Amino acid sequence: PSFRLLFLELDVPKPDLTVKVTGKQWYWSYAYPDNGKFEFDSLLDKDKQPRLLGVDNEMVVPVNKVVRIQTTGADVIHSFAVPAFGIKIDSIPGRLNETWFKATKTGMFYGQCSELCGKDHAFMPIAVRVVSDQEFATWVDGAKKKFAANPANTYASAGQAAE
Ligand SMILES: [Cu+2]
């Protein structure tokens, strides 16, 4: 029976939006291909609570929507894990893995890198902020402007810069 469960877990339902998650030494980058193709980095913010889980830029998603996660690694293998959503999937360089979740409540949800990846493995948290549809639309508007203006953030991390 567990094999049947594992199989079903990998069957991604029709997504409402996709977020591409790239693991890096030692932070995550989030790209929003369905919402204007902006991308930004999410780094540990030592001054934020909860300790070791707060970040400068959170991954923001709408509530009650199927969010497809596509994940890869830019340097070494990382792993994207958010216990509250029951997801954990390796972020492997050269490979695009898929998983999904659907948050049924608004609020903050946290995770951590779950594949030993070097010096700051313990310091590259995942912070997901789940908001209403309206708040999400407002956030997307702001994020498009904010992150387009930041040359350090290039869409899709790998390959796009050369075009
Ligand atoms: Cu890592």
Image: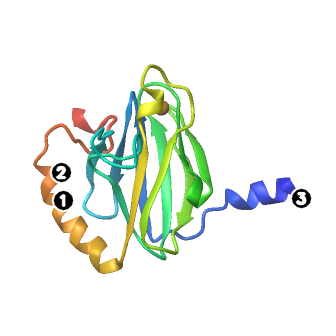
Q: Is mark 2 within 8 Å of ligand 1?
A: no
Vertical relation: 104 (above or below) 69 = below
Residue 74, image x, y percentages:
41, 31
- The one nearer the camera, 162 or 101, is 101
Identified at 20% across, 59% down, the residue is 143
Q: Are marks 2 and 3 in contact (CB under 8 Å)?
A: no
- The one nearer the camera, 65 or 163, is 65
Please give left or right for residue 6 compared with residue 14 in the image.
Answer: right
Whichever of callouts 2 and 3 sits on the residue coming sooner in the sequence is 3
Badge 3 marks a residue whose secondary structure is: loop
**Which residue is farthest right?**
1
As shown in the figure, which amino acid type bears the numbered disc 1?
Lys
For label 1, the residue is: 144
The N terminus lies in quadrant: bottom right
Q: Are marks 1 and 2 in contact (CB under 8 Å)?
A: yes
Residue 6, image x, y percentages:
76, 54
For label 3, the residue is: 1
The C terminus lies in quadrant: top left
What's the CA distance linking mark 1 and mark 2? 6 Å
Badge 1 marks a residue whose secondary structure is: helix
What's the CA distance linking mark 2 and mark 3? 45 Å
| Colour treatment of the image | rainbow
Badge 2 marks a residue whose secondary structure is: helix
Q: Neighbour class for label 2 at 10 Å: few (<14), some, many (≥20)?
A: some
Q: Neighbour class for label 1 at 10 Å: few (<14), some, many (≥20)?
A: some
Please give left or right for residue 163 compared with residue 81 in the image.
Answer: left
For label 2, the residue is: 147
Identified at 50% across, 25% down, the residue is 117
